[in-house]
Image: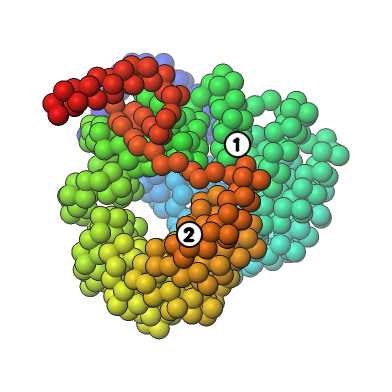
Amino acid sequence: MLLTTTKTHFPFYLIRPKTSKISDLLHTTSEIQYPCNSYTHLFKSHPQTRSIEQIHARIIVEGTCHCSFSATHLVKSYAKAGYHLTARRIFESVPNKSVFLWNAMIRACNQIGSWLEVAELYRRMEGEEIEPDGFTLPFVIKAFSALSSVEDGKRIYELANRIGLVRNVHVATALIGMLLNFNEIGLAREIFDRMPERDIVAWTAMITGYIHLGYHCEALQIFREMRLGDEKPNSITVLSLISACGYTIHALIIKLGLGFSVEVETAILDMYAKSGDLAMALSLFDSMSQKSLVSWTAMVDGYAENKFPHEAISLFRQMLKFPDLKPDTVVTMSVIQACAQLGSLNCGEMIHGYVLQHGFESELPVETALVDMYAKCGNINAAQMVFNRIQDPSMVTWSAMISGYGFHGLGCRSLDLFEQMKTVGFMPDEAAFLSVLSACSHSGLVYEGRECFESMVQMHGMTPNVKHYACMVDLLGRAGLIVEACGLIEGMSVEPDANVWGALLSACRVKGNVGAAELACRSLCELGADNADYNVLIANVYAGFGRWDEVSKVRSGMRRKGEGKTPGCSFVEVNCKMHAFVAGDRSHPQSKDIYAMLENVHALAGDER
């Protein structure tokens, strides 16, 4: 059988090899009584593609290419070099395949994640009545796990039990991982407990499986058992424990002297950032001797998620100073999110330029983030242009554009786009309904909002959550339908939260309904959400009806608690940086120059009068 590889222009056996060390060795090999054994050494010591082809040519000349032993080493070598199809052709050319050759081909398929091919090869093995060994089963088990093939997985477990391989550490570890993936916790634990010896991979498989299934206490118990033995946790074990242990894993690593890999440090940093402890996250970030792209991304994303957009953008700029770091779509999305929070159109446009320069513009998550950013930064036309260029928008993309129209009071456009989304085959989800209800609320489209809310329940069979109810209360309240809003709250299928009662209280402030305002205020107090802003609202409601005694009580209570109304502020953007100003505020570092300029402006205005 004549074989070629995809990376050579001519068949290797037509190319006359140059005199080289490998050709000399091949010449010597022909004089040895058992050449196959010598080729084993040559394959290991010369893994280059050209050398493999030369050895292969020699095997063909000697007529041993259909020998299972030679084919096994050829399959291994070609697969390792990336020539999977060539390896498969060699495998198929052998009439009597040994279990070693089957193992080599199954392993080759496993290396490229070709799980269906692994399953097909194993079924052929079964058909030819070739008994698998301890090297076959781990790869086959991994394939059945990846394919979520429960019946096949259980069948292979029974086989391993029958032929005594369930006590093999590698087979048992693979079975544990597969059974935990199938949510067969009891069976996985039974195999684990029966293992005569366990390596760190087996311990980690059991710990990770428990954690993924939400059994954190059981995972920690296994970890304690491991520590009582001789096994020392590695970085993979530690990474899996982070979600179960939280902050204590950091102290445990230091206590056990496990040392930090970049992956472990980054995972702990990400844990602190997601929990809102940005000071600790930054401290860990600054102390890292090596920072990967993932480390920078975790810190930038931590700032963006915790509403520190200035810091997120500033850190991204620092990141760009390192030529070895190539920002990807994940960190770019976090920076776009920060620009949207900041409302900085200039900065957002600069990041968009960076996206175009680095070829991220065709990535759907980035395009969706740009739509959201332009809408929130006030340029709805740019948002629409980005949206119109997207080839295949997702539900999230549609929702972002619908919300964008809503932010700008274009409720009718939101509704049209919502209908268009349904026309092209999308079934609206909870987020899409929230976007369109919010748009109706901003635009005062009461009838259309009611219709959407009812269709969500009656036509699509969804149960509204508190965010949907808050939008409806806000919509009805803005329209002065306070009684209807109260009735909606009474009939809610979930407990109303502070957003629902806050929306009602805001509506009462505008429309003047003391009874509903007092109900909302009491409910907010019960929820522990009686903050200064809500107290100011109820005081204003009382003031509107001339109930000054009640106003005095509310304000006295605020003074006792040391509360004050959150002052409004103005933002000015200069060089992609937003500067906030509050009335009478002199905290800005250039306040002297600013106030001097204001005095000059006042003076000029006075002269003109």
Q: Residue furthest right?
A: 228
Give the SS element for disc 1.
Answer: loop
Residue 471 appears in which quarter of the rendering? Answer: bottom left
Q: Left or right of 607: which side holds 248?
A: right
Q: Amino acid at mark 2?
A: Ala
Which residue is rendered at x = 69% and y = 54% of the image? 210
The residue at which mark 2 appears reads as 543
- When the figure is inspected, residue 38 is found, relative to residue 90, above or below; the finding is above
On the image, numbered disc 1 is attached to which residue?
277
Q: Give the percent coordinates (x, y) of residue 594.
A: 33, 21
Local SS, label 2: helix
Q: CA distance from mark 1 to mark 2?
A: 41 Å
Q: Nearer the viewer, residue 273 or 514?
A: 514
Is 142 above or below relative to 183? above
Query: In the rendering, at what x and y percent does residue 450 appear?
Result: 35, 77
Q: Is residue 314 above or below residue 302?
A: above
Pair 1/2: label in front: 2
Image point 66% across, 45% down: which residue? Answer: 560
